[in-house]
Amino acid sequence: MLLLNAIAEAGDVTAGASQVCRVMRQSEDGITTRIIYVSLQAINAGDVEQNLLLQPGDTVIVDSNKDTIYVNGHVDKPDKYDFTDGMTASRRSSRPGASATTPPATGPRSIGSSPAR
């Protein structure tokens, strides 16, 4: 199934959807996950090479075009938060409702490859 067909089958994108989606694909080694960024705008403009042939196990993520961030994992209050200019992990943790036990940020991390789960 092609990416655009899968999105259409899921009910299409909403008005607030980003024009870039991500396809999470497990690598052949079975250990890492590749993140493939796809321009939905390019597909709709006729760039058929962007319309990926999906593989079993792929995950398609269409984010919001709004300035939001998602905090998940081992945190007291996993949730969606409004992004503000200059926001850092330490600023987020000092905002009302954040845990006092939140460890300091260690810097950005690569998302090119991550262990598969």
Image (cartoon, rainbow, N blue to C red):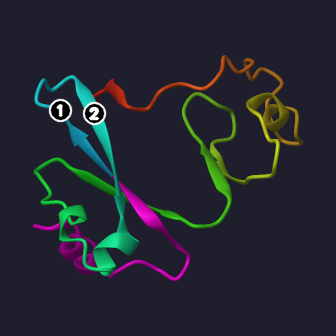
| Callout 1 crowding tier (Cα within 10 Å): few <14, some 14–19, many ≥20 | few
Point out the image quarter for the C terminus. Answer: top left
Is residue 19 a member of the stretch shown in magenta?
yes
The one nearer the camera, 71 or 29, is 29
Q: Secondary structure at mark 2?
A: strand
Q: Is residue 33 left or right of residue 5?
A: right
The one nearer the camera, 23 or 99, is 23
Identify residue type, mark 2: Thr
Task: In the rendered structure, find residue 58 and report the number of the disc placed on it.
Answer: none
Compared with residue 41, is residue 84 higher up or lower down, i.e. above or below? Answer: above
Task: In the rendered structure, find residue 33 and report the number of the disc placed on it.
Answer: 2
Is residue 8 a member of the stretch shown in magenta?
yes
Q: Is residue 28 left or right of residue 67?
A: left
Magenta residues span 1-22
* Sequence-wise first label, 1 or 2: 1
Compared with residue 47, is residue 110 higher up or lower down, i.e. above or below? Answer: above
Tell me where residue 43 sits by quadrant. Answer: bottom left
Identify residue type, mark 1: Ser
Tell me where residue 31 sits by quadrant. Answer: top left
Give the residue number, with chain letter if any, for mark 1: 27
| Callout 2 crowding tier (Cα within 10 Å): few <14, some 14–19, many ≥20 | many
